[in-house]
Image (cartoon, rainbow, N blue to C red):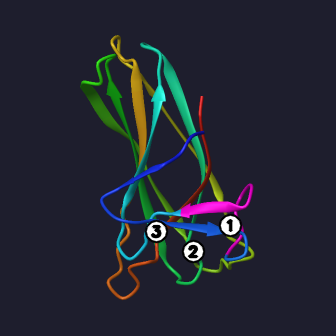
Amino acid sequence: MGCWRVFGGEVDVASSGYWDAKGGKQSLELNGTINRQVLQLYAAQPNTTYQLSFWLAGDPFRAGTVSLLAVQEQFDGTGTYITGQTIGTYNFDTTGHTADDMGYQLVTGSFTTGPNTAYLDVEFQSLTYDVSAPWWGPVVDQVTLK
């Protein structure tokens, strides 16, 4: 996986000293001071089914349910947008979880590219906003696209 591009605001990269990552040493929380979105661009094959997998948790310093929307968008060889659709909306209840026991859950979704697809992006968008704790949101780790 390459780098994630943040658009429309800020996100938090949390290292293992702050809370446990599912794998490696970092995880990505989609809320900084407001909920935001990240995306990553991939080369793609036309008429191909892809499976997106990732581990989902939530900021454990506040109890409740956080929500995340996963979206994919497809582009042709010139970079022109073709189509996009929701992969899924996913929820995670942070109640009872701690920084040492995040309770990550494996999430999977799939989609099929169209006949002219040359590139696609995968986007994660936080659907969580709590005015009294705007930093509290979904946490993503170990994203794969096959």
Per the image, the residue denoted by label 3 is 66
Name the element at disc 2. Answer: loop
Q: How far from the left and from the top, in percent, is residue 36?
A: 36, 62
Per the image, the residue denoted by label 1 is 103
Above or below, 29 against 4 in this view is: below
Q: Main secondary structure of the magenta part?
A: loop
- The residue sitting at 64% across, 57% down in the picture is 105
Residue 68 versus residue 145: which sits nearer the camera?
145
Q: How far from the left and from the top, in percent, is residue 88?
A: 42, 45
Tell me: 103 left or right of 115: right
- Cβ atoms at labels 2 and 3 below 8 Å apart: yes
Above or below, 1 against 115 in this view is: below
Number of residues whose C-alpha sits closer than 10 Å to that of mark 1, classed few (under 14), some (14–19) or many (20 or more)? many
Name the element at disc 3. Answer: strand
Tell me: 101 left or right of 61: right
- Cβ atoms at labels 2 and 1 below 8 Å apart: yes
Magenta stretch bounds: 19-28
Per the image, the residue denoted by label 2 is 94
